[in-house]
Amino acid sequence: MDTSFSEQDIAFRDEVRAFFAASYDEELRSRAANVDTFKAAVVEWQRRLHKQGWIAPGWPVEHGGTGWNSTQKFIYESERAAAGVRDVVPFGLTMVAPVIYTFGTDEQKEKFLPRILATDDWWCQGYSEPGSGSDLASLKTKAEVDGDDYIINGAKVWTTYAQYADWIFCLVRTSSEGRKQQGITFLLIDMKTPGITVNPIVSIDNHHSLNEVVFENVRVPMANRIGEQDKGWTYAKALLAHERTGIAGVADSIRNLGEVRRFAEQEVNGGKTLASDPMFQSRLSNIEIELMALEYTELRVLATVAAGGAPGAESSMLKIKGTEIQQAIQSLRMEVAAYYQGVLPNDLAEEQLGHSFGSAARQSYMYGRAATVYGGSNEIQKNIIAKAVLGL
């Protein structure tokens, strides 16, 4: 694999770097970090990306994509993470949109895709249910046909940003015959529809991003069905491949590991930096090696997609290793925070040190325990690989 950049690549990198420096300013960064201004700030940022023409690097050009090659996509993502720029909210742009432009009707494409590009609609994902997480095909939220509509009853759980959402894409059961993967239908549901209740779930990091969404006799037009009735599992699997590839988070892990290294080198306890400890150096180096290997794997997947392919079992590989590396970095980050901060009350330590590295370390560590579970647990991903790659 040739990893050197051409002159055109370097020029593109400089353009991306300059855009982020000019457009993702400190005021916007601060608002995006505040729960009260979060949604408005994210919408504003994504609209700046849309105005630049960079909101959907993975979309086909005919639907509003950038037309970038795999190297440009890699450069863009690397520069975004290195600059500490937040990624786009994935549910509309990188999850349901590929399903719509691949399997949707012309009317659905015309209705939904421009609004997703412009962040006029905020989407959330209705997959997991109480008792149906990684075993997603066991879902029980029911859709019964009533004329030209479906009547939906049931509940979804762990629904990220449902409190902000205008629309939710949902898997519902339209038949109980045959294998459990059969009889599942993919619906697009307006969150303003009567009968939908959003109940907040505050996670262990004390943040509210998760929710339960309850459906009580919710009426959804059949025109909002993607593809055929009872064939939703096919569309769901296509969406999950995109989701799991994104969950790997390679570029962000590179930035986070660099931050861990910087703090380990700066903070001194008893006249010795943690970065000088041989055991710490060994752990840091092992993560760096695994992260570099994952980065090359991601580049190969990008090249496959650019050549017209689709992420298959490779997305499961990226998801497994990517989330394991994320958790390893989070654990190392906790160790660095404890090295210089564990002997002081949190608020006093952060006042003296002039930063919130310790708080961020705790929050990312606690919420990060879920990374190997959401998007399909890593155990399930190993089963997918065993079947798809090894033929077991």
Image (cartoon, grey):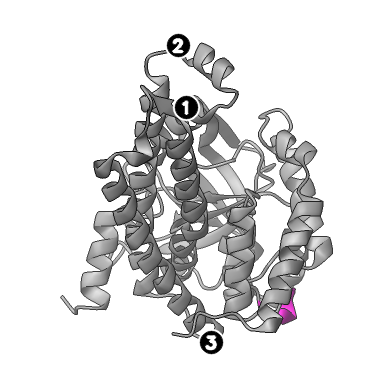
Q: Contact, CB < 8 Å: mark 1 with mark 3?
A: no
The image's mark for residue 304 is none
Considering the numbered disc 1 on the image, is that residue within a helix, a strand or a loop? helix
Mark 2 Cα shell of 10 Å, populated few (<14), some (14-19), many (≥20): few
Question: Which residue is label 3 attached to?
Answer: 308
| Viewer-side residue, 96 vs 203 | 203
- The x and y percentages for residue 184 are 42, 62
Alpha carbon of mark 2 to alpha carbon of mark 1: how far? Answer: 11 Å
Question: Which residue is label 1 attached to?
Answer: 358
> In the rendered image of this protein, does residue 2 appear above or below residue 325?
below
Residue kind at label 1, given as amino acid type: Gly
For this orientation, the residue located farthest to the right is 51
Q: Residue at x 59, y 78 (%)?
A: 71
In the rendered image, which quarter is residue 183 located in? Answer: bottom left
- The x and y percentages for residue 325 are 35, 53
Q: Residue at x 55, y 27 (%)?
A: 356
Considering the numbered disc 3 on the image, is that residue within a helix, a strand or a loop? loop
- The x and y percentages for residue 152 are 52, 48
- The x and y percentages for residue 60 are 66, 79
Q: Mark 3 or mark 2, which is nearer to you?
A: 2
Residue kind at label 2, given as amino acid type: Pro
Question: Which residue is label 2 attached to?
Answer: 345
Q: Is residue 197 left or right of residue 156?
A: right
For this orientation, the residue located farthest to the left is 392
**First of labels 3, 2 by sequence position:** 3
Mark 1 Cα shell of 10 Å, populated few (<14), some (14-19), many (≥20): many
Which residues, given as a range, are shown in magenta? 60-64
Residue kind at label 3, given as amino acid type: Gly
